[in-house]
Amino acid sequence: MEEIFSVDLTPNEINFIRQSLESVTIQGKDAKFLANLQMKLEHELSEIQRIKQESELKKQKDLEAAIAFENNKNSGKR
């Protein structure tokens, strides 16, 4: 079994690698390896997108909660 290592890459770097794999010339014996590599990169890009969306949704909810709190606080002063 191969060892697995973690590498810190930005989403742009991962995307560049993924796109670069589209133009690589390979032999038939390497097709499965390349397909698996492409799938791993696609999965990572999908996870990054999911995490970003969840983060934005949380920020939006937090902002809405803060606005509602301020509105309630201000309406009680009247």
Image (cartoon, rainbow, N blue to C red):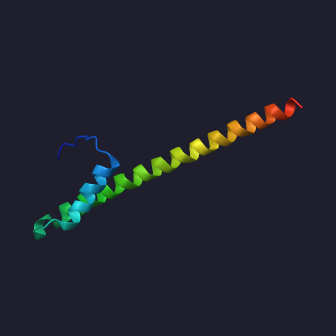
The image quadrant where one finds the C terminus is top right
* In the displayed structure image, the side of residue 69 where residue 6 appears, left or right: left
Please give the count of numbered marks on the rendered protein.
0
Q: Residue 59: which quarter of the image?
A: top right
Residue at coordinates 86% horizontally, 31% vertically from top-left? Answer: 76
* In the displayed structure image, the side of residue 66 where residue 38 appears, left or right: left
Q: Position of residue 67 (x, y in %)?
A: 71, 39
The answer to which of 12 and 5 lies nearer the viewer is 12
Q: Residue furthest top?
A: 77
Residue at coordinates 41% horizontally, 51% vertically from top-left? Answer: 47
Q: Position of residue 68 (x, y in %)?
A: 74, 39
Q: Position of residue 41 (x, y in %)?
A: 30, 55
Q: Position of residue 62 (x, y in %)?
A: 63, 39
Q: Residue furthest bottom?
A: 28
Q: Is residue 5 above or below residue 20?
A: above
Q: Residue furthest right?
A: 78
The answer to which of 3 and 63 lies nearer the viewer is 63
Q: Is residue 70 above or below residue 34?
A: above
Q: Residue 42: which quarter of the image?
A: bottom left
* In the displayed structure image, the side of residue 54 where residue 4 appears, left or right: left
The answer to which of 7 and 78 lies nearer the viewer is 78
Residue at coordinates 17% horizontally, 67% vertically from top-left? Answer: 31
